[in-house]
Amino acid sequence: MTANLLSVRDLKVSYRVGNGHIDAVDGASFDVPRGSIVGLVGESGCGKTTVARALTRVIADNARITGGQILFDGKDIAAIPERQMNALRWRDIAFIPQSAMNSLDPVYTVEYQLNEVLRRRGGLSAREARMRCESLFEMVGIEKGRLRDYPHQFSGGMRQRVAIALALALNPKLVIADEPVTALDVIVQRQILDQLRELQTMLGISVILVTHDISVVAYICDRTVVMYAGRVAEAGPMAGVLTRPAHPYTMGLRNAFPDLAGAASGTLTPIDGAPPNLAEPPPGCRFAPRCPFSIEVCSTESPPLAEIVPDHRVACHRASEAPVLREIAARTETWLAHA
Amino acid sequence: MHDLALQKPGLVGRMFRSLKLPLSDPFAVFGLAVYATFLLTAIFADAIAPYDPTEILYTPEYELASDLRPGEQGFILGTTSLGRDIFSQIVYGTRSALIIGITAAFMVALIGSVVGLVSGYFGGWVDAVLMRLADIAFGIPFLPFVIVLAAFLEPSIWNVVLAMALVLWRDTGRVIRSQVLTLRSRGYVDAARVCGSSDLKIILRHIAPNILPLSFLYGSIAIGWAILTEASISFLGFGDPQSISWGYMLQDAFASQALAKQAYYWFVPPGICIILVVSAGFFITRGYENLLFPKLGR
Amino acid sequence: MSHLKAVASRTLQLALVLWAVVTILFLMFRLMPGNPMAAYIDPTFTVEQQQALMAQFGLDKPLWEQYFIYLGNLLQGELGQSFRYREPVAERIFALLPNTLILTFSSLFVAYAFGILAGAYLAWRRGSAVENAAIPLVLMTRAMPEFWLGMVLLAVFSFWLGWFPAGGTRPAGADYDSLWALYTSRDFLSYLALPALTLAIYSQGLPLLLMRSNMLDVMKEDFVTMARIKGLSNWTVVVRHAARNALLPVMTSFAIAVGYQLQGNVVVESIFSWPGLGRELVNAVSASDYPLAQGAFLMIAVVVILMNLIADMLYALLDPRISHA
Amino acid sequence: MAGTRMRSAVTYSNEPLVSLRSAELHYRVGGALSALRGRSSVVKAVDGVSFDIHRGESVGLLGESGCGKSSIGRLLMKLEDATGGEIVFAGEPISGLRGAALKCYRAKAQLIFQNPFDAVNPRFTIRATLAEPLENAGIPAGEREARIIAALELVRLPQPAQFLDRYPHQLSGGQLQRVVMARALILQPDFVVADEPVSMLDVSVRAGVLNVFRDVRDRLGLTAIYISHDLALVRYVCERTIVMYLGRIMEDGPTEDIVHEPLHPYAKALVAAVPVPHPDQSHDPLPIGRGAPDPRNPPSGCVFRDRCPRAFDRCASEVPQLRQIGTRKVACHLF
């Protein structure tokens, strides 16, 4: 048994668009240790959701996994036949979608949809399934009387709890949660995150939490993987990455985020420009065009994802200078001068 | 407005562009080609048709040229029981078909679009009244309505157009209304109101251009409906006996025992023509749907 | 409870629509040019006789009075006397209604069964050669005049092959103990076959295209993707989730189709001499038998409006998002 | 343009620029046909809201979805008419504005939209989008180009001329949101409502748009309402915050006071729930019950009482009024 439940190595996913193709994920590597919550964070279009879906191998019709390995429990599930993969789905790898409203079939009761998984995929008898339904609802804090309700009869937060119950139905080893709280208001968001953390600890499962929100990562994750333009920029223990970021992009994000705990008079600093068009990505480091620290090599050579301190990896040519850059990056002028 | 117009082609060109003809869809192109062919046939009917469609013809032997098979005596598609040239009738039939189809479609698209625009944009009691009117129009059985109308009024091809204008705006109106409702909730419509644009300006600049393709789509469906309806009415004997239409030809054939005589050359060609014109409209429509609602996929 | 209220309010709305249609009908028949009695007044009648006849049908009273008499009569189910048959219109129409309904429903059942299956199949095979060939063909069937299709079928299967009779509902001189005996006889089925086939071929396009495009839409929904992520079998995903959801609007379109079909029947019944409402309407109009024409029209309108209501209710009933609001 | 309008923020007069007096916006949900789709009832999107905003003041409207904050924005923009109460702008009720007076109001009060991709017509170039308000205000065609460029410079869109003939889809979200701001500012308004202007933007560009907003507001001395669900953003732009819940005001006071010591139980929960981008933070359960506000079926008395950890009998029977407590106003029976 390896320490990591999941190891993604150099994963590539590309979409066919018109006559060309877009490499939405272009060589992503990260690990998910057993019993941990890993936050996959990045802005829209960075490839985080594509990675999440690629792990289930249920991807868009025009998408294809073009390279790399997905080692789940030591087995490369990117390479196994579809039948074997299907056997793993939901029993070992479950999924919590962003919008539970659209992800639950509107014409069936919640109980039917739980039963469907429990009986067809879990092989439970009708009686076992009923008991399991009730205990699942108890776990996520919904009265069991509501099992007979249809998805639209639940509020957004409740529906997300249903989605969690559904994901935990077959005791999976890994749960992938794709922006599970993005559509929710802050209060419900917090309550759902608390629930997720509690269940994760109780069941000892691993969770990959896809999000665009660093605060969500800060609140709940053990580790984080920061993605930018289809690649991993930085990965490591959450506290390390957030307090001592080593990639200029992560440093920039910190400055751009309003912080209620900070002083009132602080100034936010944007990262100038926009992420590159993935149909024609820039050569070298993809962040180089927006990076105040870019040097010549940045625009010619892709930086490798290298370990700078134990367990903390960064893809930056100037990673060794990180402590110095961090100080410079904390100043607003750094980013303005670049603009 | 002026500086906007300066950089763009003229009004006609712009309208044509905003119709977004689906030229990338092979079926739609086929449909447009069918339309073009029939349009040309209708315009040059006098030159194409060898005979007057109502003329009773005789063979060189001075016998009535009745029930001749295709090719016999040089009649391309044969003759009717009364000795009329079927091919010429087909050619002239395109005229009434297209006149009815295009005017009816224009009326339906125009009335439906105006109703949909007004109803959807202004809402409130205007909407309530117009939509109850649409409900009533939906409660009127269309074909029986045309029959009664045709029976009371002088027989004329315009009866069908009138009936369609009175009743069939309902479908177009409802669809366009719901489209307008979606458009009205778009931020840029609110933005136009906040920056002081009048209702009329908002309708003309921000909403109408977006529903034009939809009007055109429903117009092309209405062309088919009009032609089918005219054919049915003529077939039932409520048509205009003065004008040769495909429906009239079918009625003539049916009444003259063409079925028993196995005179397929007589009643099959008009049917094929109707199918071609009507399905041409459908094909164009389908091209549009792929264009307007690409999520439907192919 | 709110459901009952909603249904009641929709029913009320459609009752108003019915009233409007009834009024339009009245005005059409009274305000149109020509004396409605003209065809039935023998030129040899004296003026007194003519006036007596007018009075008998209530045509001598002012228009508004005629309107209220007409409304009052309608409420009592009284549709007047047929000019031609000299018998109550209501009786005649109710005798013909079953023929029309049998033709309509039998053809629609065939059309929907075929259309739903074929539509689902085509959605599943999207992009294939089969689909590319089938869709234009289906569109062509929608572009066919029904009566022309009837003519072709008659010419081939009746006049040429002689497999089916050319028209009517029963062989000449045949007599049956009851309507039930007639409707269940083999003869009746052979008479029904061609008109029903004609209508079915024409009608299958709607459910087919609707089912197909709904399926294609639903297949893109998140819950279908989720069903795949759950590792459910292809059959479960396609049938239990995609098809089940796609079927909803198709089912409600059935009710609407009944209404449309009833209008279309007018021509097909005439071709096959099928003694139904539509043919009666055509004959009555041709013979200027206004009470009968008016009655047949009204009956068709009632069914159309009723079917619109049923479509609404069916939708509310079948979709839990509405039935369990 | 900016120079002529430059005004110090000290023109605070006693008379408020904007006042809501028991403003109400009640919807009847569902007509006869849509009644089939659900029950028909009255939703009180805004239910008796009163506040004053003085010239030069920036106020944050804070609350969760369905609390009525956006509805207040729509009421102020006259996109919706109040079903009760009164909205006064510069001493004049806006409900009666018609024709020329309305046009005049439109030039003074402007809205910045949430979703920039929805707020501009995709068929229009940036030039045409920005020309529309100028046309409506009767600015001669010859002057428009210069005004457009000036407005784009004001929102710090670099090299504005290059954008004029582009279509919206050719711009990034951040650029487009600046165009939306430019449109709102081009007629030199006195009052601006910004409805979640950065919620659709990625974090890395958010800060840029927020900074432009803050900067322009200060330079032009604008009076502003900033609508948001995010207290951290409100705090960045507004000195005063109004917390709303189910159509009513719960608390109204200086932003810093609310951030550091919220009084109303709902405000307490909301402040505690704001996500913080730091590893070391409190993981205590929120002081609020589970469940979600149901605008169709609000509880009697205090609308928050069903989720309030400190609710008592009186909360069910009596609607708490907004009362002055120190620096702020609170609607709660505990005070």
Image (cartoon, coloured by chain):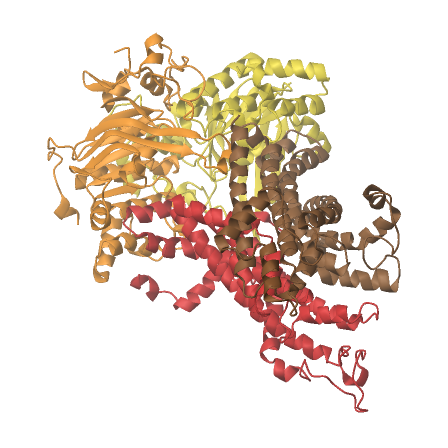
Chain colours: A yellow, B red, C brown, D orange
* Residue sitting at x 60%, y 32%: A55
Quadrant housing the C terminus of chain D: top left
* Number of numbered labels in the structure image: 0
Q: Is residue C121 visible?
A: yes
Q: Position of residue C201 (x, y in %)?
A: 74, 54
Q: Quadrant of residue C47?
A: bottom right
Q: Position of residue B216 (x, y in %)?
A: 51, 60
C303 relative to A275 in the view: left or right: right
- Is residue C240 shown above or below B10? above
Q: Quadrant of residue D209?
A: top left
Q: Position of residue C83 (x, y in %)?
A: 67, 58
Q: Position of residue D71 (x, y in %)?
A: 33, 34
Identity of the residue furthest to the bottom in this view: B61
* Residue sitting at x 29%, y 35%: D82
Most foreground residue, D120 or B284? B284
Most foreground residue, C290 or B62? C290
Identity of the residue furthest to the top in this view: D313
Q: Is residue D179 visible?
A: no
- Is residue C266 shown above or below A112? below
Q: Quadrant of residue A259?
A: top left
Most foreground residue, B72 or C35? C35
- Is residue D237 shown above or below D3? above
C178 relative to A25 in the view: left or right: right
